Structure formats: structure tokens, C-alpha cells
Amino acid sequence: MSARPVIVVFDVGKTNKKLFLFDENYQIVFEKSARFIETVDEDGFPCENLESLRLSVFDSLSEVFRLKEFNIKAVNFSSYGASFVYAGEDGKPAAPLYNYLKPYPVELSEKFYNKYGGEESFSLQTASPVLGSLNSGLQLYRLKIEQPEIFSRVKYALHLPQYLSFLLTGVYYSDLTSIGCHTAMWDFEHNRYHEWIQREGVALKLPPIVPANKVSPPLFPGTSYKIGCGLHDSSAALIPYLVNFNEPFVLISTGTWCISLNPFNHHSLTLDELKKDCLSFLQYKGQPVKASRLFSGNEYEQQVKRIAEHFDVDAIRFRNINYNPDVVKKIKKSQTQARYEDNFQKESVFATRDLAGFKNDTEAYHQLVLDLVNLQAASTQLVLKNTPVKRIFVDGGFSKNNVFMNLLAAEFSDLEVFAASMAQASAVGAALTIHSAWNSKQVPNDIIQLKYFSAGRAAP
């Protein structure tokens, strides 16, 4: 029996590092995961253990190459992208991979923004809210100002997906999905690096930008598989939807953050949108995607605990609670409902509600989800308005929440609303990007499973 053709995808999150083998039908045929103990930078702040990660890539590859039932045709990477690996002349890291949660010096931030037109103007140009170290370009600026000796030794600054690719190819690349995601590096109006990149001498530290479907041969002689240049994980997760669906859509990706992504919104970011936590990033073909963000997953977890404690029930009970239109009808009459379109908030009003006003935990839970959905609708509407979108896909945690999905369908009754499920969207996206380099089959049309939610079932 001949070996099955597969692609290896490394999906590197901040906490979990995973490896997947996908066959030509994009089914997972092998997987493994690892977690590493963080190390610290020169200030004692926790950061990625690059050496452990490097060794893990090589060890994991050696392991899967020994599996005779698979014929490895390609390797690609998806990873978080908001930090740089500073490669020296020898290709080894010249500095730590600084944590994007590390506090950014206020004085340095003020100096930077004052030099380049102020926070509002600069943020609009780069479609990047002021996020401190989460703006990875500002990490590079900080290195130049605070540690000029190290900066001078840096040959290239690589976002993490491209560093992982470099380990196997020895070739330095930059990628638009990493550059274009709140890095404060890209000028969205002129579709090029922002002027500060040149003026600060940073441009010399950035390798050439290549297309997302670029593949290279491995460093090691005698092997014939292809290696992709890696992608930012949020952008990679959007790719299966862009490949599978031609009709305009919005994807609401839910988890700790709930992010509404509209690849069909080509309007420039406005100051009002920026203040309401919108941004733009670049998808794998270079076009901008407008996005709005809420921290709703975190709020949901906190408020479910509050409800459980107040009514003395186990919070696990809420995982499978079913939508009840009669309960929704009752609380809409008995409770004042908040609308957020004209008074946009980053959190719902539920935290201010007195739980004594609810008859039981079911009522309180439905009100929590109703508040979150009303806020989600206002957030999604920021990227939805004036676009030809007819469908909304929801993936992640809330896509499995029956109450959330029914209420969302009611809120967007003029659109088709679907819960979407797909195993490992970021990894699938990385595999799809270089499909033609490893896969002899057509892209299957059943990678994403959809469940339709009708507005007719929801309470008025």
C-alpha cells in the first residue's frame, strides 16, 4: 500500500504548540501538541522559549518523517504574529522574542506618536489602535532606541511564522498577513510600509515581502518537499471561508475575543470606528479586511460564574442550556433592554444588573446572552454597514451556544446566519494557501460544516 500524501502544519499559539498532518481531503490524520515553560527577557518579563520551540520543530519533523504510512509533500506554519524574532548574521536570535503583553514605556510611546503626527492620525494611517507592545512595529522601534548595540547586530526582524519557515529553508521572508495585523507598520492608504519604517532605518532590517503561496525547498539535501513562508494565525483562519464561499460574508470568530471580520468592506477606517475598537488587517492575497473586536468571551465567563454563585448552581449547567423563546419574551417585558448602536460600549450592561430581579438562573442566563448579542450586533454592524454581505458565519465557542445563535439570528433577521464548525481553521488555512504545491486534488467543498439558524424561531 502506497504512502498517503500529506502536509505538515505547525500551529503555534502562545500557550499550545500543535502539529497536524492533513491528507489531500484536508482531514487530520495525525496530530500532537506540546507546551513549553516560558523563559524571561533581560527585564525578567516572561517570554517565548525560542530554543525549545526550535528544537521541537526539528524533533517533531523527524518523528513524522519516520511514519512510513505518510508521504510528506509540504510544510507550512500558522502562528501568533505580534512579536519579532531578531535574527543575527548567523541566523540565531540576537535578542529574546519579547512578549506582546509586556508594558510599553509611556514616554517612548509619546515620543513616537508625536514624531509621526499624533495617535489618531497615525492609527488611521496604519489601521492600528494604540496597543503598546501588541503593535509589533513599536517593539522594533523600542529595540532601536533602548538597545542600539543589539539593534545594530540584527540582520533581519522576522515575525514568528516566517522565523519558523526560515529554520527549515534558511531563507528570510516577510509576509503581508503578519505585517498587516495591528503592527503600526503598514500604510493602508498607500498600500506600502509607513514612512517611519524608512526614516528610522528599520526598512533595512525587514526581508523582502513574498506572496502567501510562495514555497521554497528545504535546507537539507536529498528531500523534495516544499516549505511555505508561514501566516499570521488570525488571517489563516479566514482562508477556508474565502476559498469555499464566493458570496460576500462576515465571519464572527468567537473565543475570549469575538472578532467580526468583513473581507468585503473596502471603506477606509474612520476615527469613530477606531475608537470603537475596529481595525483593518491584510488577508493572504493582500486585500484589507475590516474587523471589529469585543472581549465578550471573557465577560461571558465572568458573568456565568456570578449567576452560578447567586443561584447556587454548577456553572457547567450552562454549557448545554437550550434556547427558550418564552423566557426571552418574558425578560424583554420585565427588564429594560440596552441598545448599543448610539451608545457603543466595550462591555454589555449585564454586570450592572441586579440578579435578584430574575426568577431563576435560566432567566438570568438568557438575559446575559441577550445583552451580549445586542452588543455583538452593534459591533458587527460597524463592519457590516454599506457592504453587500448576505451571510454571517459564526465559529468558535459561541457557535455551539444554542441561545446565542438563535438570538443572533433574530438580530440579523434580514441575513442568513450559520454556525460554522471546522477543525483547526488556522492550520487548514495554512495548508490551503499552498494547496497547488502539494495537493493533486481539487479543494473539497465540505471542509466547513454549517448549521443554519432561522430568525423565525426567536422571540419577538
Image: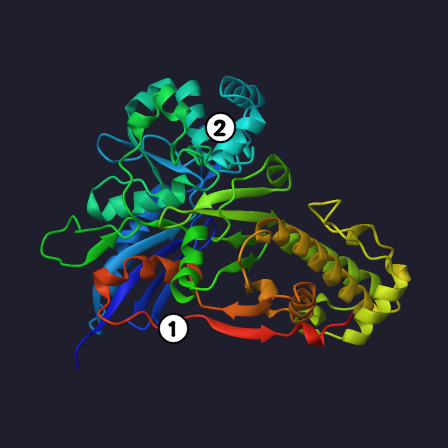
Disc 1, SS: loop
Is tag 1's residue or tag 2's residue first in the polypeptide sequence? Answer: 2
**Taking 379 as reference, is 424 left or right?**
left
Q: Are marks 1 and 2 in contact (CB under 8 Å)?
A: no
On the image, the x and y values in percent for residue 49 come to 39, 42
Question: Which residue lies at the image location 43% right of the left edge and 51% below the top edge?
Answer: 235
Amino acid type of the residue tagged 2 in the rendering:
Asp
On the image, the x and y values in percent for residue 23 come to 29, 71
Q: Does any portion of residue 134 appear in the rendered image?
A: yes
- Front in this rendered view, residue 390 or 64: 390
Question: Which residue lies at the image location 28% right of the left edge and 53% below the top edge?
Answer: 213
Query: Disc 1 designates what residue?
Result: 445
Query: Disc 2 designates what residue?
Result: 43
Disc 2 crowd, CA 10 A, few/some/many (<14, 14-19, 20+)? few
Mark 1 vs mark 2: give the one in front: 1
On the image, the x and y values in percent for residue 368 come to 75, 60
Amino acid type of the residue tagged 1 in the rendering:
Asn
Disc 1 crowd, CA 10 A, few/some/many (<14, 14-19, 20+)? few
On the image, the x and y values in percent for residue 345 come to 72, 45
Question: Which residue lies at the image location 39% right of the left edge and 34% below the top edge?
Answer: 96
Q: How is the image coloured?
A: rainbow
Q: Does any portion of residue 200 appear in the rendered image?
A: no
